[in-house]
Image (cartoon, rainbow, N blue to C red):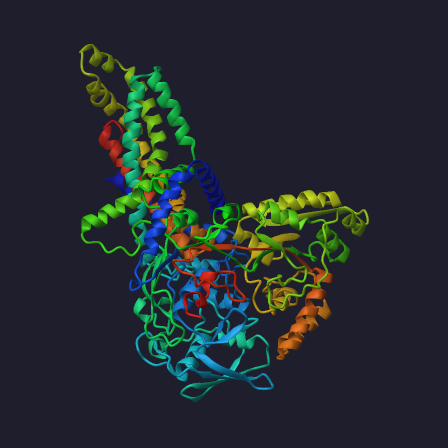
Amino acid sequence: MKKSGISKLLLLFILTAIIINITGCGSRRDQNTAGNVDHEKDSPLIIRLEGGDWGLPSPFAHYSRGPGMAKMRLIYDSLLEKGEEGLIPWLAKEWSISPDGKEYAFVLNSQVKWHDGKMLTAEDVKFSFEYFLKHPPVSNSLLIDGKPFIEKIEIVDEHQIKIAVTEPNATVLDRLGIVRIIPKHIWENVDNPKKVRDLDKLVGCGPYKLTHYNQEQGTYRYQAFEDYWGPKPLIDIIEFVPVSDPVLAFENGEIDLIKVPQDLMDRYKGNEKYKVLKSPAFWGYKLMFNMEKKPELSDINVRKAIAHAIDIDELIEKVARGAAVPASPGYLPIDHIWYNPDVTKYEFDIEKAKELLNNRTLDLTLLIADDQREARIAELLKINLAKAGINLTVQTADMKTRDSMVKEQNYELALIGHGGWGQDADILRENYAVSVAKDNSPASNVIPGYSNPIINELCKKQLTELDEESRKSMIKELQKLISDEIPLLPLYNTVEYTVFRPEKYDGWVHVFDHHEVTHNKLSYLER
Amino acid sequence: MNMIYKKIVKLLLTFFVIITLNFSLPRLMPGDPFYFLSSEQGDIAITYSEEEIQRQKAYYGLDKPILVQYGNYLINLGRGDLGYSIYFGNDVWTIIKNRIPWSVSLVLLSIILGGLIGILLGCLSAWQRQRTLDKILYSTMVFVSEIPPFLIGILFLFTLAAQQGLFPLSGGMTPFADYASWTDRILDLVHHGFLPALTLSVVQMGGFFLIARNSMISVMNKDYITTAKAKGLGTWRILFRHALSNAALPIVTRVFSSLGQAVGGTILVENVYKYPGLGLLMRQAVLVRDYPLVQGIFLTVTLFVLIMNTAADIMYKKLDPRIN
């Protein structure tokens, strides 16, 4: 897309300039860092991050993207939080699940204040769940496959609540846990929450209050909430500011954290002024097979031949510039907490691919988005697949067009890049076992023409298995099955490098299921 | 009187065709505002199930037959209601209204700046025709006008903003600024707007230069210029009093037509500088298929161009009474 083209060019400029002009730039940067370190102990710690407009951070109005959601979550707390290893207690200090898996009891912390000084009670929690069922928020976890699953919400006392669900389901705790709790006294009379745009109405019980938002400029300012119930906020003020080029802005001291392209890593690595964090690889590309439109693809040997004819290492080196890891044929990436290292792998081997194809030749069309990286991947795939006897025609469309073509199953092969690979392992079911009648097809994850009863059965079983260990072993088995079958082929998962100046702020951390340090609450709080 | 009626009917007809196109074009694009399958690298898009998508569509009235949607659009438009943005979660007119001043000032400023310099150099070039100055100017201008606007933008961004630190890297004003007085405010706005305006001016300059040069050259061969020269009038007087006023017609047309072009240029330039104008917004709106917002922006831009064209017609008649 345009954007990536521009950033590529910028990168080129920066590189040349760094070579030509090291001294000039260097001296100016020193001044900036010196200025930053000088701030006295008493003066507030202000951290600036890359902004841009991601919407008013209300649960109903932020944009449907990661940065929008993260900004909203700074204001609103939930019953549980994502920690470095897994779910951790948050507004709820304890919870229990009934043996039949149909009742969830939460015990709330008692000293939780809303930003306007009122106290949070179980009444607010009940209200939030009920309100979200009527008025779904932008990010809605209260539906499983599009259907609500809460049967009844019961207040036990001021700080205890019980939630009954329609059937046992392993993802329910996560789903209930991440629901934002909103104050009843603000929202109970609001009929159209999408239209609430008053900053005064954004009262949460989270660690930060929003004090400024400007949609055109893409600026946000958050102030630490002095009466926050939980771990102390370490940053006093967070400011999100618009940035044209993040690297330039970081060098100029305008922002305090960036994600650095692999090509510029040498500038920061080994320099003690900077700290580099490597992200878990939770964003990736996968290759979709439409076996309905191209019945040849339902032959497992053809799919295996394609897998053998793709040189993943070359893709990583040439397209991702080294900042990626090979994806697992079993889908869950290597950084996933339940990754199975013993899945079947397909090494790059053209001879083997030919053998599997049995001297057949195949003509396939690959649908990609008009993005530079995708075009490069497609070109490299084309070259290697041709050697195995598969002729690839590349078809390009803009991202939205490509997405809807995939939805309408109007493709043979499609390349798709997306995030969220670190989520609950139920993504396996969503990717490999969603079967819906054609006329009512959600299709986003359907593999046209493919259905495997064993995989489907196991996917269903893991969903209702509440014992974590046995669910984990099912998921591992599932990955193995999937890797033998490769109904779709994951290619690679990208790694990101976050760079910041530790002497100014050193609290950045990754949580277990996300690749972005600025998108989780823990990064801003005392640990 | 009859003429004016005809003119008005013609304008209304054009307007009607335009709003019909505005309505149908975004809907003809493949893609769906609620459906996100992929995301840009490193980004997470929230995905919705089919039930949720249907519910959202019902909320925005997008589940109705297309003709009903069209009827509703016309009725709402008649009431001055541009609709509610799907992605941005705000009133379309509020969003656009807040962006207009940024883009319009950028466009106007760049045309004034680019126009003045371009015309001035064009006159000089015509005067010095076939001499060294003309040759240098001509080839430079042709070269400059062929560079894509975003490239010029990046060049300025890098040299003047990043390296020299003379200008801010992005944005339309200092974030969270607390201005002591309105002069501070204006200075800050100028400081931020200067590079985007300069970039657009450079883009505009080439076109103005070429048209001014051509127009001047044809005028310079006219008898009255020879007479003026023979009378021993000064160079400046001949150039700007006698020649330019007669060469002005195509230049004026150019000024107004370039207003439309400048809107196109702002899209790229605003994206380079993250300048909070309509261009930045339009790109995002199209990428996420935000129908109401795309319609609103197209409408605003077409209205702007229509008004400018009408203004050009009026100016034309004022400048040259022969045209009627």
Which quadrant is the C terminus of chain A positioned in? bottom left
Relative to the observer, which residue lies in front, A325 or A292?
Answer: A325
Residue at 37 percent of width and 79 percent of height: A112
Relative to the observer, which residue lies in front, A371 or B175?
Answer: B175
Where residue A417 appears, as percent x and y from the top left, is 57, 55
Where residue A420 appears, as percent x and y from the top left, is 55, 62
Relative to the observer, which residue lies in front, A122 or B105?
Answer: A122
Where residue B282 appears, as percent x and y from the top left, is 40, 50
Q: In which quarter of the image is residue A466?
A: bottom right
Where residue A225 appears, as percent x and y from the top left, is 33, 71
Residue lying furthest top? B230
Residue at 37 percent of width and 27 percent of height: B141
Residue at 77 percent of width and 46 percent of height: A361
Q: In this view, does A91 lie to the left or right of B183?
A: right
Relative to the observer, which residue lies in front, A442 or B273?
Answer: B273
Residue lying furthest bottom? A157
Q: Is residue A166 left or right of residue A54?
A: right
Q: In this view, does A394 lie to the left or right of B71?
A: right
Does residue A308 show up? yes
Does residue A1 show up? no
The total of numbered circles placed on residues is 0
